[in-house]
Amino acid sequence: MAEGPERVLFVHAHPDDETLATGATIATLVDSGAHVTVLTCTRGELGEVIPESLQGLSGEALGAYRLGELGAALAILGVVDHRVLGDRNARWEGREPRQYLDSGMRWGADGAEPLESADGRSLSAAEPGEVAADIAAVMLAVDPDVVVSYAADGGYGHPDHVRAHEATRTAAEVLGVPFYVVDSEGARRGPVVVDPAPVVDRKRRALEAYATQVTVTGDEYALSSGGPKPIGARESFTRLRTEEPSFKDYGIVARIVTLLIAGALGLFAGALLTASHQATVAVAGVPVPWGLVAGLLIVTALLIGLRIVFETRAVALAAGVGFLGASALLALQSAGGSVLVPDNAVGYAWTFGPVLVGAIVLAWPKVTRPIARAARSNIEEPARKGPDPT
C-alpha cells in the first residue's frame, strides 16, 4: 500500500449508483482522511424519471441534469475528485475524448435484460478493451490502493453494471490493484462491512439530491423499479481474488506461523551463508570473494521477494532478524575475531553488508506490485482491437 492517506477508486455505471450502493462507505472513507475518487461511466440518459414535473427530461438533457444531481450528491458525501469515463481525465492516453451512453435495460421474466437494440455508442456496446483501458487510465492517474465496483452480475443484471464490473476487473488485474465488489442483494455478506449509522444523514441528503430517480421518505427510499428500502442498510464488500491472499488478509494464527517460518528461513540462510562468505576464487591471479558477493545477492533477493509476495514489511523483517541473529551468533568475537567471521575486509563487509541491505529493503516505500505504468502495453493492445467510435 502506498504511503500517506488511503486512496480508493469507486467505479459506477450511472449517476446515483455511487450513493445507492456505496454512499455510506464513501462518506466514511472521506471522514477517515482517505482520498476518494468516483468514476461514473455514463450520464444515465435512459433513466426513468419519477416526478411529473421533470417528465420532460430525456436523452442528453436528462444526462446533463443527472450530472448536476451527481455533483450535488458527491459534495454532500465529501468527494472532490469525480471523473466521467471517456472525458480527457478518464481516457486512455492518445485517444480523443468520447461519451459512453446509458445502455438502458428492461425487466424480463428472469430480471433485468438488455434492450432489443442499444445505441452503438452505449457502454455495453463499446469494445471491452477500450472501456478497460479508460478505467486503467484513471487508475494510473489516481494510483489507488483499492478499486471498488459491482459483482459479476452487476448487482441486479443491468448491462452497464455488468460491463463496469468486467472492465474494472480487467484493469485491476493487469495493474495489480486489489479489487473489491459490492455484494449483490441477497448474496452472502462479505468480510468488509460498513456501518452507515455515523453518516446515514449524509447518505439520506445525497439520495435526496437525485430528484429524478429517488424518492426519499423518512428512513427509506424508493426507485421507479420499486421499494421501499432502508437508507441505513449496511454496505458490504468482498475482495475478488485472482491470486493468493496477501499477509494482511491472513488470520492471527496464520500470521504468527508465517512469521515463525520466515524467521527460521532467515536463521538457516544466515548460518549457511555466514559459513561460506569467506570463499574466494582466483580470476587472472586475483582472489575474488564470490562467497561474499553471492551471500549479499541471496539475502537481497530473499528480503525483496518476501516483501513482494506478502505485501508487508513484517515477514521480511522476521527473516532479516533471523538472518542477522545467525550471523551475529557465528561472529561472536574472541581474540583476533571469530573462526567463521575473521577480522578482515571480507568479514567486515559481511558484518555490515546484510544490515545495510535489510535497512534499504525495509525502508523502501513501495515494493508490493510492479509500477503501474510498466503494464500499459498489457491493456493498450486489447483496447486497439476495435475501432475508435470517435
Image: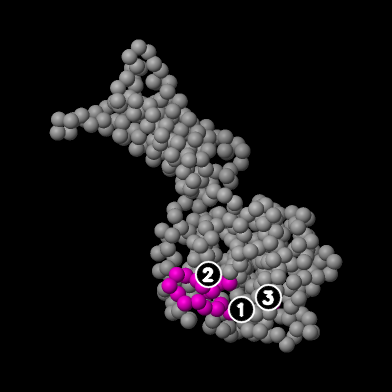
The residue identified by callout 1 is 102
Residue shown at 42% from the left, 68% from the top: 380
Q: Main secondary structure of the magenta part?
A: loop
Q: Secondary structure at mark 1?
A: loop
The answer to whether residue 142 is above or below residue 342 is: below
Q: How many marks?
A: 3
Amino acid under disc 1:
Asp
Amino acid under disc 3:
Gly
Q: Which mark is residue 89?
A: 2
The one nearer the camera, 75 or 14, is: 75
Could you give the CA–CA distance between mark 2 and mark 1, rounded to whole angstroms? 20 Å
Residue found farthest to the top: 335
The one nearer the camera, 22 or 227, is: 22
Q: Position of residue 371 (x, y in %)?
A: 44, 55
Amino acid under disc 2:
Asn
Which stretch is magenta? 84-111
Q: Position of residue 113 (x, y in %)?
A: 64, 77
Q: Which mark is residue 68?
A: 3
Mark in the foreground, 1 or 3:
3
Colour scheme of the rendered structure: one colour
Residue shown at 66% from the left, 55% from the top: 29
Q: Secondary structure at mark 3?
A: helix
Q: Secondary structure at mark 2?
A: helix
Q: Position of residue 271 (x, y in %)?
A: 39, 26
Mark in the foreground, 2 or 1:
2
The answer to whether residue 91 is above or below residue 145 is: below
Which badge, 3 or 2, comes first in the chain's sequence?
Answer: 3
Residue shown at 35% from the left, 12% from the top: 335
Residue shown at 74% from the left, 71% from the top: 209
In this rendering, position of residue 305 left or right of residue 26: left
The answer to whether residue 314 is above or below residue 68 is: above
